[in-house]
């Protein structure tokens, strides 16, 4: 059974940090691009960041413009886990954060409709 389980969300003050984790199981983790998305009620889900692993083991990362320089994505293939380190958080970062997986190497931020698997999300709330 394929599973993506997010954790690490919570309440933090503006300027603070959180680290989200996405633990994957049930598929060949290192063959997939993993993306983080977020969604606010009433708005479309948007891509935040993604990480893929190329055929030579190289890692490629991508970020949305609103989080570039503040968020860092990384993957630990030994643990089948992807992390999203979020620093300098702003109230506008408040959302439910989802991780998702798509087979292959995706150049750039993937879009929601191409993702194969989704987690259930974790809520991040940034207070002002």
Image (tube, rainbow, N blue to C red):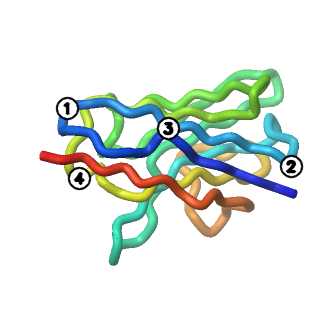
| Percent coordinates x, y for residue 64 in the rendering | 40, 45
- The front one of 93 and 31 is 93
The mark tally for this picture is 4
Q: Secondary structure at mark 3?
A: strand
Label 2 Cα neighbours within 10 Å, binned few <14 / some 14-19 / many ≥20: few
Looking at marks 4 and 1 on the same chain, the residue that comes earlier in the sequence is marked by: 1
- For label 3, the crowd category at 10 Å Cα-Cα, with few meaning under 14, some 14 to 19 and many 20 or more, is many
Q: At which x and y percent is residue 68?
A: 35, 35
Q: Rounded to the nearest whole Å, what is the CA distance between mark 4 and mark 3?
A: 17 Å
Which badge, 2 or 4, comes first in the chain's sequence? 2
Query: Residue 88 vs residue 47: left or right?
Result: left
Residue projecting furthest to the left: 128
Q: Is residue 87 left or right of residue 29?
A: left
Marks 3 and 2 sit apart, C-alpha to C-alpha, by 20 Å
Which residue is the site of mark 4? 92
Regarding mark 4 in the picture, which secondary structure is present there? helix
Asked if marks 4 and 3 touch (Cβ < 8 Å), the reply is no
Describe the element under mark 1 as helix, strand or loop: loop
State the residue position of label 2: 26
Q: Position of residue 35 (x, y in %)?
A: 58, 47
Q: What residue is shown with label 1?
A: 15
Measure how far apart labels 4 and 1 are at the Cα level. 12 Å
Residue at which label 3 appears: 20
* Camera-side residue of 29 and 122: 122
| Mark 1–mark 3 distance (CA, rounded to whole Å) | 16 Å
The mark nearer the N terminus, 4 or 3, is 3
Check the image and report above or below for 62 versus 93. above
Q: First in sequence: mark 3 or mark 2? A: 3
Residue drawn at x 44%, y 40% as measured from the top left = 63
């Amino acid at each position: 059974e394929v599973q993506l389980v997010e954790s690490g969300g919570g309440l933090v003050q503006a300027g603070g940090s959180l680290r989200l984790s996405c633990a994957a199981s049930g598929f060949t983790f290192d063959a997939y691009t993993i993306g983080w998305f977020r969604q606010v009620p009433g708005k479309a889900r948007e891509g935040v960041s993604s990480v893929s692993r190329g055929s030579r083991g190289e890692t490629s990362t991508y970020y949305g413009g609103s989080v570039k320089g503040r968020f860092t994505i990384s993957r630990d293939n030994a643990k089948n886990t992807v992390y999203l380190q979020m620093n300098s958080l702003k109230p506008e970062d408040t959302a439910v954060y989802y991780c998702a997986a798509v087979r292959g190497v995706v150049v750039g931020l993937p879009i929601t409709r191409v993702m194969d698997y989704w987690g259930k999300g974790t809520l991040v709330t940034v207070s002002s």
